[in-house]
């Protein structure tokens, strides 16, 4: 029997779409020009960037002039947070949440040690923030609120539109890390009043090493990268033409597949979740089932440990991820699940499956087929709770 | 991705001696579910006092399962005196090495073995635990004696190394100064121990921090937890104690009241009249 390869770790990274790679290749070969040059090779590169900028703007319902290309999502987050703060030097308060990605959380914690007051909003057991807490925390000193659109571990979606209205009414700026949301959820920046928004290419079938920072027209912003005039002075450095082209194409594809993401991919996720909860025993979903990314499920399998599960699944060709301490390299279990108050017994056995449009119905059948005996096998090894669990069946 | 040896993978994917023994001669348990790993080891002796059968159950990652499986193979055929000599490094060597961050899995194996041997000799496991010393790392329940033993056996020099071997210090990091002291003690550096204060005089900072921690743990946390909340000590600066409220407490409108009235009064009662409690801004 050959091992099937089922990739279900799309919130970590995605495969590069074939169309994306194809669009990129000419810019490694004959069209290798620098768009700033004054010869015949510059124009095609410049035109390609203009087109890519339009493709990205189209996915976000933004104006192309508001799109700045960066090297990755982390750079976008850093540039947004630090760029706003250095443009508003008289304000010293930042608000964020306890469940942000390290690219935001660690930047804010760093700033907290360097003269800024940082408020981390708590989340409830569904992973949702409390808008009243945000309202009470905002004050005249608040320069920036940085809140993710959707959480990478649980897929929980924050009410960004309401957050934006509240933040704007208090005269603060809003940065939104939309790295997980982009391509999976419709993002309409005509109606959602965020000032800055981060995207990462490799989460939506473009390659690693390319990101976007959306900066709304008129936003106070001071660049992180200083050098040449590229990106209208908002991000210096020679444009990464092939990757920019790839990201543009990936955004165009994401726009075309948005409907599929909300229907077919969501149905796959729902079936996976339902069958695992039924068959793998003593499993529970982490997060807010009603407000989640369509592709993500975080499931805790009680009495067994995440790394062991991942190793077993990996041997069967299944790629997923875990919030367990042993997979983090820091011996600390997921800060997201802990902030939600998920008990230790469930944090260590949490597995995130994140799907994409490249997953099929057969993939789901295969994951369930392998996950159920994996849970059973590890519970046979585990000293906790197994007797009652399987005796009942 | 951890770099596991083929031997580790073999023992993880095909663990030896999983399960329990009816009427075992020795049973030892180490770790807990809250720590992220846990091991129950049991064995049966033959008429010559050699370990005839050994079995284990593990909740934990790949290397925790592999370490326990390897340990059962290592002890079968040995007398208790021989088995007692096995160190965590022996377990790691048997597996062809473990990633440094995973050395604590081998320590857990050695400690479960120690507990099982004590159990088979009719020694009280609780007494053994008491002999192990007082808990330094509260996140992972690691004692000073355990840390000192690992520092000596493995010639450790930094807190980071101690964390890799025992997990101690890998959580909230509050115990890092204590671990540094233990390392300094082992490698023979004269510690700048403050002379014992005469009674009635001011406490040393270390004494005060310990007392605040104990008061939080024993007097305050049980009360808050009863209401679904929790409290975490963030920092101490002189008499200012910074804490963070967790769980229900963090969203409770009366949290300021809780802090001021309850936490502060308790800390003033048990530690010092001058304590001021503040909510830490995360």
Image (cartoon, rainbow, N blue to C red):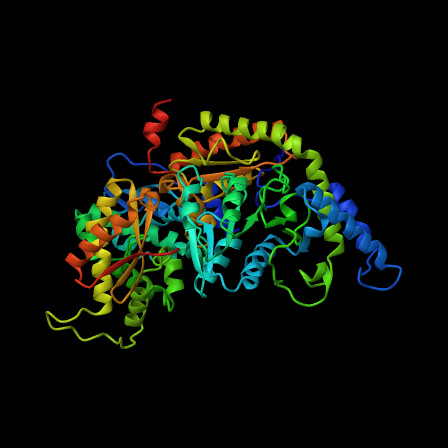
State the residue at coordinates (62%, 34%).
A4
Residue at the right extreme, as displayed: A40
User: On the rendered structure, is A374 left or right of A247?
Assistant: left
The answer to whether residue A246 is visible is: no
User: On the rendered structure, is A136 left or right of A42?
Assistant: left
Q: In the picture, which quadrant includes the C terminus of chain A? A: top left
The answer to whether residue A381 is visible is: yes
The one of B227 and A301 positioned closer to us in this rendering = B227
Q: Where is residue B194 in the image (x, y as percent from the top left)?
A: 21, 75
Q: Position of residue B154 (x, y in %)?
A: 36, 64
State the residue at coordinates (64%, 64%).
A225
State the residue at coordinates (27%, 45%).
B28
User: On the rendered structure, is A54 left or right of A188?
Assistant: right
Q: Position of residue A176 (x, y in %)?
A: 56, 48
The one of A60 and A13 positioned closer to us in this rendering = A60
**Res B157 → quadrant:** bottom left
Looking at the image, residue B178 lies above or below residue A175: below
Q: In the picture, which quadrant includes the N terminus of chain A? A: top right
**Res A70 → quadrant:** bottom right
Q: Position of residue A373 (x, y in %)?
A: 47, 31
Residue at the left extreme, as displayed: B199
């Amino acid at each position: 029997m050959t091992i099937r390869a089922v990739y279900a770790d799309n919130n970590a990274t995605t495969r590069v779409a074939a169309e994306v790679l194809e669009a990129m290749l000419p810019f490694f070969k004959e069209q290798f020009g620098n768009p700033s040059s004054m010869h015949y090779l510059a124009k095609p590169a410049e035109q390609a960037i203009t087109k890519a900028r339009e493709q990205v703007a189209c996915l976000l319902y933004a104006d192309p002039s508001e799109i700045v290309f960066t090297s990755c999502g982390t750079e976008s987050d850093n540039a947004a947070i630090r760029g706003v703060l250095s443009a508003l030097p008289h304000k010293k308060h930042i608000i964020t949440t306890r469940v942000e990605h390290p690219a935001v959380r660690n930047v804010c914690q760093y700033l907290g040690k360097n003269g800024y007051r940082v408020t981390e909003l708590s989340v409830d057991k569904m992973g949702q923030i409390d808008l009243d807490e945000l309202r009470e925390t905002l004050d005249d000193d608040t320069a920036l609120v940085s809140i993710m659109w959707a959480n990478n571990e649980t897929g929980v979606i924050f009410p960004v539109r309401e957050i934006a209205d509240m933040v704007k009414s208090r005269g603060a700026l809003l940065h939104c890390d939309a790295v997980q949301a982009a391509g999976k959820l419709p993002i309409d920046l005509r109606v959602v009043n965020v000032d800055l928004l981060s995207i990462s290419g490799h989460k939506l079938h473009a390659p690693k090493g390319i990101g976007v920072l959306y900066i709304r027209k008129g936003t106070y912003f001071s660049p992180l990268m200083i050098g040449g005039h590229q990106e209208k002075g908002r991000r210096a450095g020679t444009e990464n033409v092939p990757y920019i082209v790839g990201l543009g194409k990936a955004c165009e594809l994401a726009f075309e597949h948005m409907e599929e993401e909300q229907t077919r991919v969501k149905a796959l996720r729902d079936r996976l979740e339902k069958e695992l909860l039924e068959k793998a025993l003593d499993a529970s979903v982490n997060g807010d089932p009603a407000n989640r990314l369509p592709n993500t499920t975080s499931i805790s399998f009680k009495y067994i440990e995440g790394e062991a599960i991942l190793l077993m699944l990996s041997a069967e060709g299944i790629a997923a991820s875990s919030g367990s301490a042993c997979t983090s390299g820091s011996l600390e279990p997921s800060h997201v699940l802990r902030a939600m108050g998920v008990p230790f017994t469930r944090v260590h056995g949490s597995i995130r499956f994140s799907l994409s449009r490249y997953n099929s119905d057969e993939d789901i059948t295969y994951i369930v087929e392998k996950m159920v005996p994996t849970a059973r096998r590890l519970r046979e090894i585990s000293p906790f709770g197994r007797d009652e669990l399987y005796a009942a069946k | 991705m951890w770099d596991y040896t083929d031997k580790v993978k073999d023992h993880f994917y095909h663990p030896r001696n999983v399960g329990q023994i009816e009427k075992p001669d020795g049973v030892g348990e180490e770790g807990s579910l809250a720590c992220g790993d846990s091991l129950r080891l049991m064995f049966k002796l033959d008429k010559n006092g050699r370990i005839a059968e050994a079995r284990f159950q593990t909740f934990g990652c790949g290397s925790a399962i592999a370490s326990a499986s390897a340990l059962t193979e290592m002890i079968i055929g040995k007398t208790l005196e021989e088995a007692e000599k096995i160190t965590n490094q022996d377990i790691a060597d048997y597996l062809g090495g473990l990633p440094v961050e995973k050395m604590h899995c081998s320590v857990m194996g050695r400690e479960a073995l120690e507990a099982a041997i004590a159990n088979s000799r009719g020694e009280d496991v609780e007494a053994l635990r008491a002999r192990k010393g007082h808990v330094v790392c509260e996140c992972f329940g690691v004692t000073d004696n355990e840390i000192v033993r690992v520092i000596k056996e493995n010639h450790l020099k930094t807190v980071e190394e101690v964390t890799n071997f025992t997990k101690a210090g890998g959580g909230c990091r509050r115990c890092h100064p204590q671990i540094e002291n233990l390392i300094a003690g082992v490698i023979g550096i004269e510690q700048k121990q403050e002379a014992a204060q005469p009674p009635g005089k001011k406490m040393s900072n270390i004494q005060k921090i310990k007392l605040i921690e104990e008061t939080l743990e024993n007097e305050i946390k049980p009360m808050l937890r009863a209401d679904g909340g929790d409290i975490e000590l963030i920092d101490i600066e002189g008499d200012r104690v910074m804490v963070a409220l967790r769980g229900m407490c963090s969203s409770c409108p009366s949290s300021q009241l809780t802090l001021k009235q309850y936490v502060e009064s308790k800390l003033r009662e048990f530690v010092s009249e001058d304590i001021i409690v503040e909510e830490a801004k995360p």
